[in-house]
Image: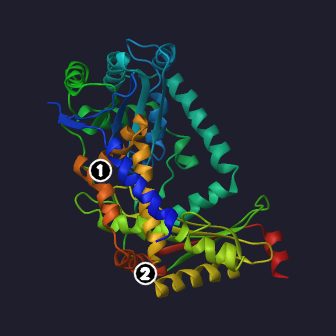
Amino acid sequence: MNRLLAFAISLLAVTGPAFAEQPVTTFKLDNGMQVVVIEDHRAPVVVHMVWYKVGAADEPPGKSGIAHFLEHLMFKGTDKMAPGELSDVVAANGGNDNAFTSWDYTGYFQRVAADRLELMMRMESDRMLNLRLTEADVKTERDVILEERAQRIDSDPGALFGEQRRAAQYLNHPYGIPIIGWRQEASKLSLKDALSFYKTYYAPNDAILVVAGDVQPDEVKTLAEKYYGVLPANPNLPERIRPQEPPQLAERRMTFSDEKIAQPYVIRSYLAPERDPGDQDRAAALVMLSELLGGNPATSVLGQKLQFEQKKAIYTSAFYSALATDDTTFGLVIVPSQGVTLAEGEAALDAAVQQFMKDGVDEVQFERIKMQLRASRIYGEDNVQSQAQKYGSALATGLTVEDVRDWPNRLQAVTTEDVLAAARDVFNKDRAVTGWLTNPATQEAVSQ
């Protein structure tokens, strides 16, 4: 171990207790709503978040984009609030708010002064039950969604490429459907569709309340019972059962060519296990594998070999999405250097991975990454919103508070043997999609 790494680890060991994880309290309301309180009394600020355990992967067939569409519509009015009033009130009180949709959840949050928590609960609980929509609201927001798709997806060949790759990755599972929806389906979403989705899933027994900041658990419980506890549960909430992938028996390959592509690249994604309740060890090993292969370009396996030694790439990366309800993906990327074809880049990428599996894990690099992950967790404790995000996203994908607390320990417990076992399991091209994004003129010129 080099002196700099040893010093950094010793420094973390000394300072670690001062950055101990903040106290976390959890309880459930009588109507089934889960509540998590994360205390952080260093600043008079609170983050108030409501997570619904429903996302794009839970949409009815033929209604792709409805989860994201409803997220937009939730900022319309209720009997007590005019359209846009919630955000206006948050801003007038010096705070900020927003919302987001993923395949597995939809979330709404406000960050305000701690003494404004009750106001946030009053408004958020109101729109959980009393959203009022009109045909005009639906038409306006549907046009917004379609324009958003036009700008972010339809006019961006890289985004279209990613959408097509994901659809090829998941033939049967709804993770293959874009969150924003397929245009031909999103353009037909109606008021009836929105209200049906809202009345089915926007209920306290399908929601998680996360409050992080300068609060006391008893205070939060009293307010939560007052505003959320009186809302009726949905007794007909559907069980979260999704179509699953059939076994993938052959590699899937695709080439997406567009004249607007300035920098061609190769990307391969493999089906991989996600973090599971009480069983996070495989996911922890895959996190370490992604960091070893493609974390810091100056020190990662792919960066050192392909960017600096062989100079066959100007960029390399490895990525892994651990948080998901169902099987997720592990990916590799190479952007070839000038004069290197995509075929040559892919071959170099494969050779580098094979050499890594033959040589094994560099112990010094392995310990460095563990130290960096620990440091990142410690610094993350300084941000109340990241703390709320950490718990909300985990619980919304089926994990528990105990799983969240244990995750750092799982990462630190990973061994080099665990990493290599995970690599052997995941790197199977029969469970992969390999994609080339290219400019036909550029690629032709490179091949000559």
Q: State the quadrant of the C terminus.
A: bottom right
Q: Is residue 63 left or right of residue 20?
A: right
Can residue 330 be seen here? The reply is no
**Whole-number angstrom distance, CA of label 2 to CA of label 1:** 34 Å
**Mark 2, mark 1: which one is toward the viewer?**
1
Question: Is 400 above or below relative to 106?
Answer: below
Q: Position of residue 11 (x, y in %)?
A: 42, 53
* Residue that label 2 marks: 249
Amino acid found under the numbered disc labelled 1: Val
Q: Position of residue 276 (x, y in %)?
A: 28, 60
Q: Residues within 10 Å of mark 2 (few under 14, many from 20)?
A: few
Closer to the camera in the image, 69 or 447: 447
Secondary element at tag 1: helix
The amino acid pointed to by label 2 is Leu
* Up-down relation of residue 367 to residue 208 (above or below): below
In which quarter of the view is residue 311 placed?
Answer: bottom right
Which is nearer the N-term, disc 2 or disc 1? 2
Which residue bears the numbered disc 1? 404
Q: Residue placed at 37% from the left, 45% from the top?
A: 390
Residue at 58% over, 62% down: 164
Q: At numbered mark 2, what does the secondary structure look like: helix, strand or loop?
A: loop
